[in-house]
Image (cartoon, rainbow, N blue to C red):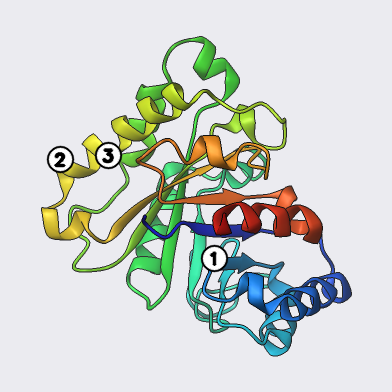
């Protein structure tokens, strides 16, 4: 059985003390969390504290990065500003709240791909796009910014239907499989078999301990991008437990 990755996107839910408290609980439950493939995405201001308090070999990532690497950009955070393993690019909240365009997302993706940091590139349709039966068209448009060559770099594509994020509404397995198949076919048209070995497909959107095993029946899923449920230690612990069963 392949090892499933859990990516915990804390968004702006936990402050520094709450982040440290969460990590201390993880440290105290070492037997459960060790040997799991987990990436934690704290708020940028909490990354250093999380890294300093973490006693397990879990990865740490950024929730977003700036278009620039260095310079006079007040309030910005470069992918080089702190040592992390991975970075989320193109999350729907960045697209919808901050109106990030495909062009800006493309620039960020290329910056991360040209660094030592692994990108998690998010795609997904809104409920209106789903109801208009253009979900696959939307995904293909979002995927159109991918570079023609990966040059041996790792890449994660996270399919997150916007209407499922935080709503408690989860697509059927058939629907997820259809969207991931559309995504994988597009990737196969771009990349060699060798490159495809370095690409993983994630699902995100109302993932919980109650539905993760059913979601795992979708054989194209390599991991999960989990939002608010990952900020509640007990909820996240129960999700991890399901992978241990």
Q: In terms of secondary structure, where does tag 1 sit?
A: loop
Q: Which residue is located at x 59 percent, y 32 percent?
A: 162
Q: In terms of secondary structure, where does tag 3 sit?
A: helix
Instruction: Decide if residue 133 is in sight here.
Output: yes
Q: Which residue is located at x 42 percent, y 62 percent?
A: 119
Which residue is the site of mark 1?
66
Q: Which mark is residue 213?
A: none
In the image as oriented, which residue stretches furthest toward the right?
17
Q: CA distance from mark 3 to mark 2?
A: 9 Å
Pointer 2 local density, CA inside 10 Å: few below 14, some 14–19, many at least 20: few
Q: Which residue is located at x 17 percent, y 43 percent?
A: 188
Quarter-of-image position of residue 120:
bottom left
Q: 230 or 83, which lies in front?
A: 230
Is 71 situated left or right of 149 in this image? right
Instruction: Decide if residue 12 is in sight here.
Output: no
* Mark 3–mark 2 CB contact (< 8 Å): no
Q: Which residue is located at x 41 percent, y 68 percent?
A: 118
Earlier sequence position, callout 3 versus callout 2: 3
Earlier sequence position, callout 1 versus callout 3: 1
Q: In terms of secondary structure, where does tag 2 sit?
A: helix
Which residue is the site of mark 3?
184
Which residue is the site of mark 2?
189
Residue 43 drawn above or below residue 214: below
Is 169 situated left or right of 139 in this image? right
Q: Quadrant of the C terminus?
A: bottom right
């Amino acid at each position: 059985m392949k090892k499933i990755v859990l990516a915990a996107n804390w968004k702006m839910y936990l402050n520094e003390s709450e982040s440290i408290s969460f990590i201390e609980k993880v440290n105290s439950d070492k037997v459960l969390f060790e040997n799991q493939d987990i990436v934690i995405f704290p708020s940028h201001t909490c990354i250093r504290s999380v890294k300093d308090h973490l006693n397990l070999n879990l990865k740490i990532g950024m929730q977003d990065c700036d278009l620039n690497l260095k310079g006079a950009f007040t309030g910005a955070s470069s992918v080089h500003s702190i040592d992390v393993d991975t970075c989320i690019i193109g999350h729907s909240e960045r697209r919808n709240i901050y109106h990030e365009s495909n062009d800006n997302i493309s620039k960020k993706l290329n910056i991360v791909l040209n660094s030592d940091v692994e990108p998690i590139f998010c795609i997904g349709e809104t409920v209106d796009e789903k109801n208009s039966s253009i979900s696959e068209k939307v995904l293909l448009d979002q995927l159109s910014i991918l570079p023609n060559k990966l040059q041996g770099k790792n890449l994660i594509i996270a399919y997150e239907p916007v209407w499922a994020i935080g709503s408690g509404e989860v697509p059927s397995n058939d629907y997820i499989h259809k969207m991931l198949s559309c995504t994988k076919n597009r990737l196969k048209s771009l990349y060699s078999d060798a490159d495809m070995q370095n690409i993983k497909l994630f699902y995100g959107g109302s993932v919980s301990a109650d539905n993760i095993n059913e979601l795992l029946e979708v054989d194209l899923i390599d991991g999960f991008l989990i939002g608010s449920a990952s900020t509640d230690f007990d909820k996240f612990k129960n999700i991890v437990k399901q992978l241990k069963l």
